[in-house]
Image (cartoon, grey):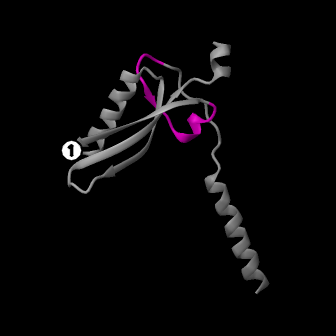
Amino acid sequence: MRITITFLLTLLLTGCSVWQTTPQAPPAATSQAQEISRAQSIGLTKVGTISATERGSPDDVQRAIAAKANAAGVPYYQIIMVSETVVPGMWYATAVLFTGSAAGRAQQ
C-alpha cells in the first residue's frame, strides 16, 4: 500500500511540471508579424485579439490570422485556437496580438 501511494504521489508531482513553461526569447521583430509560442510570449505586452473564419483547411485560416496580424502592425501573434465549425470545411481561429515588452524596448 505504501509503495502504491508513493508511486501515485510521484506521478502527480511529475505531471505538474507539464504545465510549467520555461520562458524563451521571442525572435527579433521584423516587418512581418511572426507567430510565437506560449513560452516566447512571456514578458510581452498583449494588445488585443483577432479572429478569422475561412473556408478550406486549417492552413487557410492560419494564413488569414497572419494577414490580420500584419494589418494590425504588431510584431508577434500567438494562435490560441483553430477549430472546424459545424459547417464542414469552414475553419475558425483566434489569436492574441503582442508587442515587445517595455524592458525590451528600453534596451534597443
Rendering quarter of residue 103: top right
Q: Which residues are magenta?
A: 30-43
| Residue 47 inside the magenta-drawn segment | no
Q: Position of residue 64 (x, y in %)?
A: 30, 33
Disc 1 crowd, CA 10 A, few/some/many (<14, 14-19, 20+):
few
In the rendered image, the residue lying farthest to the bottom is 1
| Quadrant occupied by the C terminus | top right
Question: Judging from the image, what secondary structure is the residue with disc 1 in?
Answer: loop
Q: Which residue is mark 1?
A: 56
In the picture, measured across the screen, residue 63 lies left or right of residue 22, that is left
Please name the residue shown 67% across and 59% down the image.
16
Give amino acid for label 1.
Gly
Please name the residue shown 79% across and 83% down the image.
2
Please name the residue shown 64% across and 31% down the image.
43
Q: Position of residue 20 (x, y in %)?
A: 65, 50
In the picture, measured across the screen, residue 106 lies left or right of residue 28, that is right
* 9, 69: nearer the viewer: 69
| Residue 40 inside the magenta-drawn segment | yes
In the rendered image, the residue lying farthest to the front is 48
| Quadrant occupied by the N terminus | bottom right
* 96, above or below 1, in the image: above
In the rendered image, the residue lying farthest to the right is 2
* 102, 63: nearer the viewer: 102
Q: Position of residue 105 (x, y in %)?
A: 62, 16
Rendering quarter of residue 18: bottom right
Please name the residue shown 74% across and 79% down the image.
5
* 93, above or below 73, in the image: below
Q: Position of residue 48 (x, y in %)?
A: 48, 32
In the picture, measured across the screen, residue 22 lies left or right of residue 56, that is right
In the picture, measured across the screen, residue 19 lies left or right of residue 34, that is right
Rendering quarter of residue 58: top left
* 66, above or below 82, in the image: above
